[in-house]
Image: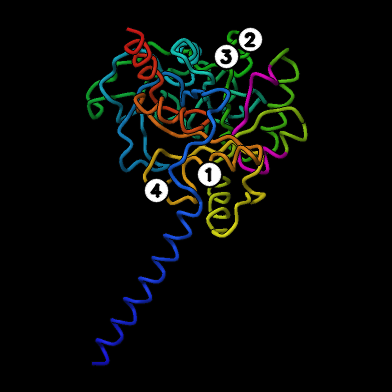
């Protein structure tokens, strides 16, 4: 009998918790739509690039060895890739930067060279000249390293950030600083000051200390928060179930949230959540590779999408126009 009484007690306690949670959840007016944002932006992650199977990927995975069968000849972080993403309708194109051994900002994703190139060693340990001599298409394979369809076609294709700014001044960029070095952030701020219009052209994504440093150096500069900063904001928000205000950690941010059912756990998702973030000076973007979601996301007040397949969104636009 005692065991049965314990189970009855636990069942009642769980029912009470569920009732309190459900009541709290619906008080926040979930499933409503925020006012439509002034602009629905598209951010192209990695530009137009070779997509890959992301299952099981970690920091040690060589994603160049697991690409899908190529349908185009673009590689990420190249001038051509960035330009193509813009032509496909991206409002901003994400690229990656490192500081070379001789103080240049170079556009490349990996910490080391072995995965994508015919070089070896740390990216930051090489000079700009050494990096530009590499074949950055050397390591790509779609068939388990049986063939390498881009070898020989991308020698000297690794650009410096300065080259990108000069050749593509009309393309808005999201620059992902791959390290946590204050020197890299200083170099970026200095470079942008040297190129007319570049401060307005570039938005920095980096750890919190570096984005704060960037804003001190360039008060009018744009910044985007990393996943860890966004996670802190969302946890702070969830910890205030009885409040309609936004925690300071969520104010004046560019929040990027996966297009996942788990997002519905956020109080007031989607419309009330978005409206509150807007009232705090923040924007809310959704990560999605499904162009069919565009109309629904825009109608619910989101500020835009981040996508790994900007070309698919362009194709959907053309189909809709027909």
Image depth: mark 3 or mark 1 in front: 1
Q: What is the C-alpha distance between the residues marked 4 and 2?
A: 42 Å
Check disc 3 and report the residue beneath it.
Answer: 171
Apparent side of residue 300 relative to residue 275 in the rendered image (left or right):
left
In primary-sequence order, the first of circles 4 and 2 is 2
The residue shown at (53%, 49%) is 231
The residue shown at (54%, 59%) is 241
Check disc 1 and report the residue beneath it.
Answer: 273
Residue 226, by quadrant, is top right
Dots 4, 3 in contact, CB < 8 A: no
- Which stretch did the figure color magenta? 198-212
Provide residue 97's location: percent of width, then percent of height.
57, 27
Find residue 166 and name its label. 2
Q: Main secondary structure of the magenta part?
A: helix
Q: Mark 1 packing: few (<14 Cα in 10 Å), some, or many (20+)? A: many
**Of helix, strand and loop, which one carries label 3?**
loop
Q: What is the C-alpha distance between the residues marked 3 and 1?
A: 31 Å
**Of helix, strand and loop, which one carries label 1?**
helix
Provide residue 252's location: percent of width, then percent of height.
66, 39
Provide residue 180's location: percent of width, then percent of height.
62, 40
Q: Mark 2 packing: few (<14 Cα in 10 Å), some, or many (20+)? A: few
């Amino acid at each position: 009998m005692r065991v049965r009484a314990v189970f009855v007690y636990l069942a009642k306690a769980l029912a009470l918790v569920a009732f309190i949670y459900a009541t709290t959840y619906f008080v926040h007016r979930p499933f409503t739509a925020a006012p439509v944002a002034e602009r629905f932006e598209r951010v192209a992650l990695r530009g137009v690039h070779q997509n890959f199977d992301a299952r099981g990927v970690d920091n040690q995975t060589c994603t160049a060895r697991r690409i899908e069968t190529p349908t185009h000849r673009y590689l990420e972080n190249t001038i051509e890739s960035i330009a193509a993403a813009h032509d496909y309708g991206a409002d901003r194109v994400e690229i990656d930067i490192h500081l070379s051994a001789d103080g240049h900002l170079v556009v490349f994703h990996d910490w080391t060279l072995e995965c994508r190139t015919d070089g070896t060693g740390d990216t930051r340990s090489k000079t700009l000249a050494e990096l530009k001599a590499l074949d950055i298409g050397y390591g790509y394979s779609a068939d388990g390293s049986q063939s390498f369809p881009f070898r020989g076609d991308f020698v000297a294709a690794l650009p410096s950030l300065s080259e990108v700014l000069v050749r593509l001044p009309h393309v808005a960029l999201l620059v992902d600083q791959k390290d946590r070095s204050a020197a890299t952030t200083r170099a970026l701020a200095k470079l942008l000051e040297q190129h007319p219009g570049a401060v307005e052209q570039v938005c920095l994504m980096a750890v919190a200390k570096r984005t704060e440093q960037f804003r001190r150096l360039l008060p009018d500069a744009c910044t985007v928060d990393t996943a860890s900063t966004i996670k802190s904001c969302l946890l702070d928000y969830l910890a205030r179930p009885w409040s309609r205000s936004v925690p300071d950690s969520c104010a004046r941010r560019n929040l990027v949230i996966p297009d996942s059912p788990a997002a519905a756990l956020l109080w007031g998702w989607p419309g009330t959540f978005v409206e509150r973030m807007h009232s705090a000076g923040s924007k809310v973007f959704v990560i999605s590779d499904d162009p069919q979601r565009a109309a629904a996301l825009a109608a619910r007040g989101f500020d835009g999408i981040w996508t790994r397949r900007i070309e698919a969104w362009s194709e959907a636009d053309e189909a809709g126009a027909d």
